[in-house]
Image (cartoon, rainbow, N blue to C red):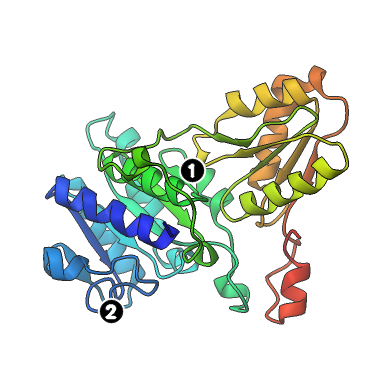
Amino acid sequence: MTVRDALNSAIDEEMSADPKVFVMGEEVGQYQGAYKITKGLLEKYGPERVYDTPITEAGFTGIGVGAAYAGLKPVVEFMTFNFSMQAIDHIINSAAKSNYMSAGQINVPIVFRGPNGAAAGVGAQHSQCYAAWYASVPGLKVLAPYSAEDARGLLKAAIRDPDPVVFLENELLYGESFPISEEALDSSFCLPIGKAKIEREGKDVTITTFSKMVGFALKAAEKLAEEGISAEVINLRSIRPLDRATINASVRKTSRLVTVEEGFPQHGVCAEICASVVEESFSYLDAPVERIAGADVPMPYAANLERLALPQ
């Protein structure tokens, strides 16, 4: 199953199961989504539940948050998460803070989803990773799937969650196919938020990463195995809450840590993981922790420079 089909089926099944779930965003209806994630949903559920919006992220995000206040469950699509900057006031000040500010009386069951991070030759303003941005905010949950199983299980969990969830997809993964179990194809399938997955077990070094970089890490682990080094690869799945227990348990076994992300190196997800390990498992380390991240520059447009700006 492709990641695109996994996301589409997850939304379809949750809309079928719960009439409060609806989709909104630019071109999600008649055009079936910029990346065809909402394919077939307008025909099946009609324009009242698959809502095409004007090109005004601040406007339709505010409408979505208001609908969530009223008890509906909006799935808000950004054509790219770079455009979420137009709506960040609603995401952070309206959605993320309302439960705390109301002493738990107001829930905001809304999902903000769309492609995040670098694509291919789309320039600095369309190539940014927002994982660290949103993961720093109390009140938000931040998920980043890698495989089709991740996409199905995590998106279902996000839609069912009573709190706002930022769901970071990757454009370059949409067409990727992954094996998927019968369990994951069941309409009741759901993955727990806040739980990482050990994609490959190892004993010599721990590699943590998320989204598209999981595939890179698994390939790197194969090359390390050829040199007699056994690498454990952890697919974070959930950026906030972060599964610190799984990460630290792995480091205490391997005594080494390499963190990988395509976002900026300063104040990133890698930095948070390194801090957690130093705080909780320092005495188990046999070597300094290592961060591998994107270059500390806006993403270049030229293909040769873009390659140099991302982890290899």
Residue shown at the point (67%, 51%) measured from the top left: 261
Q: In the image, residue 217 lies at what x, y percent?
A: 69, 48
Q: Is residue 86 visible?
A: yes
Q: In the image, residue 289 lies at what x, y percent?
A: 81, 36
Seen in the picture, residue 199 relative to 115 is either above or below; the reply is: above
Q: In the image, residue 176 lies at what x, y percent?
A: 51, 62
Q: Nearer the viewer, residue 141 or 198?
A: 198
Residue shown at the point (36%, 60%) measured from the top left: 5
Residue shown at the point (44%, 52%) measured from the top left: 148
Instruction: Nearest to the eye among marks 1 and 2: give it.
Output: 2
- Give the labeled residue for mark 1: 137
Residue shown at the point (23%, 37%) measured from the top left: 106
Q: In the image, residue 243 lies at what x, y percent?
A: 55, 30
Task: Please state if 265 lies on the left or on the right of 114 as rendered.
Answer: right
Q: Amino acid at mark 1?
A: Val
- Give the labeled residue for mark 2: 31
Seen in the picture, residue 153 relative to 213 is either above or below; the reply is: above
